[in-house]
Image (cartoon, grey):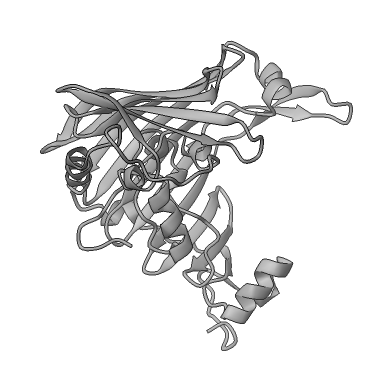
């Protein structure tokens, strides 16, 4: 959990792919990543105590959206503005989609395009509660530590994930915290069979190989880490083995010193490939960044008056167990923001 200073383990780019890889051997011998690099990485990470980011996300493709939908099942391109903010006590993520086209599949399996209006999703954790709401709208969900269905709030940020920045979620279970440690850098360097491939004065390259449980295929990830820019990930590549087929890559560029000895990339490019051909490219551009400043106003979120809230924060352990087994929300209390609560709701 977060302490007086935030420990922010840097996680893998394309982390969703990494979590699919199996195997948990510890690297040993001359090729293991040396402790001097791990300790320096940890020291650099721990300089960040709070962070506010405003990011523009845009996905492009050499293919039409209907072609992408037929090929991959993906039904929209991302065109959105994202805000991520956190300190030792609070976390917030806002994701606002532009009005954009969406591929809709009919009964015959054909895709046509429809326009989806702009909308936003807000999720915020503060004071032991997590509040979720789609905007515009008048419905909301509220969670507490006793029932919290998310693995990690901030990790759902594309920029944070692809730029390899991770921060522990205050409401995460101990199981999720343990999983995060196994899948975050630099902690994973001593838990997994990472190898140091090369190193010079400016950067070093590490790799890890494992198996994808769903398919049984071998996969390999390679990371280039910058010493010059405060142990930020410069590039990540994900390959299917043994043919060394590139599946995805992430490149971080335009590094800027946003605070003393703290660097962030202002441009991130995420690419996905199929059979050696580029399928999609998502460009992320930082519009605004604040590091180690007061972000309490940026992270605060309240439901608007009139919002109908389903509150799962007060469930008992027995009710949580039943909810997980039956998906029955009958135990959750409901209230409308701004209305006087009855004795039953209190």
Q: Nearer the viewer, residue 235 or 90?
A: 235
Tell me if residue 244 comes above or below residue 9 in the rendering: above
> Residue at point 25% right, 55% down?
6
Q: Measured along the vertical axis of the image, is residue 116 above or below residue 122?
A: above
85 up-or-down from 267: above or below: below
Where does the image place residue 141, in percent across and percent down from the top left? 56, 62
Image quadrant where residue 159 sits: top left
Q: Among all residues in the image, which is located at the extreme front?
A: 29
The image quadrant that residue 199 belongs to is: top left
Point 47% across, 41% down: residue: 95
Whole-percent x and y of residue 25?
A: 43, 45
**Residue 68 visible within the image:** yes
Determine the residue located farthest toward the right in the rendered image.
Answer: 108
- Percent coordinates x, y for residue 256 in the rendering: 20, 27
- Can residue 173 be spotted in the picture? no
260, above or below 75, in the image: below
In the displayed structure image, the side of residue 77 where residue 57 appears, left or right: left
- Foreground: 200 or 172? 200
Quadrant including the N terminus = bottom left
Using the rendered view, name the quadrant where residue 4 is placed: bottom left
Residue at 18 percent across and 21 percent down: it is 200
Q: Residue at x 34, y 51 (%)?
A: 167
The number of callouts visible is 0
> Relative to 172, is 201 on the left or the right?
left
Left or right position of 229 against 321: left
Closer-to-camera residue (175/304)? 175
Report the residue that reaches farthest toward the left. 260
- The picture places residue 147, in percent across and down from the top left corner, at 54, 69
């Amino acid at each position: 959990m977060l302490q007086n200073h935030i420990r922010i383990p840097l996680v893998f780019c394309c982390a969703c792919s990494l979590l699919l890889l199996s195997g948990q051997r510890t690297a040993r011998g001359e090729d293991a990543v040396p402790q001097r690099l791990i300790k320096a990485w940890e020291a650099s990470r721990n300089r960040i105590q709070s962070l506010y980011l405003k990011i523009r996300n845009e996905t492009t493709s050499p293919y039409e959206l209907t072609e992408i939908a037929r090929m991959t099942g993906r039904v929209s391109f991302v065109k959105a503005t994202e805000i991520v903010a956190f300190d030792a006590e609070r976390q917030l993520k806002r994701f606002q989609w532009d009005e954009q086209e969406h591929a809709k599949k009919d009964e015959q399996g054909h895709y046509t395009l429809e326009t989806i209006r702009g909308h936003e999703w807000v999720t915020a954790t503060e004071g032991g509660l997590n509040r979720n709401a789609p905007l515009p709208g008048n419905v909301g969900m509220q969670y507490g530590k006793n029932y919290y269905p998310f693995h990690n709030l901030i990790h759902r940020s594309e920029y944070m994930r692809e730029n390899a920045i991770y921060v522990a979620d205050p409401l995460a279970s101990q199981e999720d915290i343990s999983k995060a440690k196994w899948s975050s850098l630099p902690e994973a360097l001593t838990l997994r069979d990472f190898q140091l491939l090369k190193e010079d004065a400016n950067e070093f390259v590490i790799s890890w190989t494992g198996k994808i449980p769903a398919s049984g295929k071998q996969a390999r990830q390679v990371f280039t880490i910058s010493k010059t820019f405060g142990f930020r990930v410069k590039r990540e590549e994900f390959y299917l083995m043994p043919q060394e087929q590139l599946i995805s890559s992430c490149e971080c560029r335009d590094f800027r010193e946003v605070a003393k000895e703290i660097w962030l990339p202002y441009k991130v490019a995420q690419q996905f490939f199929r059979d050696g051909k580029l399928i999609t490219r998502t460009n992320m551009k930082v519009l605004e960044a604040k590091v180690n400043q007061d972000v309490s106003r940026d992270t605060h979120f309240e439901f608007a008056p009139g919002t109908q809230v389903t509150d799962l924060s007060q469930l008992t352990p027995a009710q949580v167990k039943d909810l997980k087994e039956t998906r029955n929300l009958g135990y959750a209390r409901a209230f409308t923001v701004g209305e006087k609560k009855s004795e039953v709701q209190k």
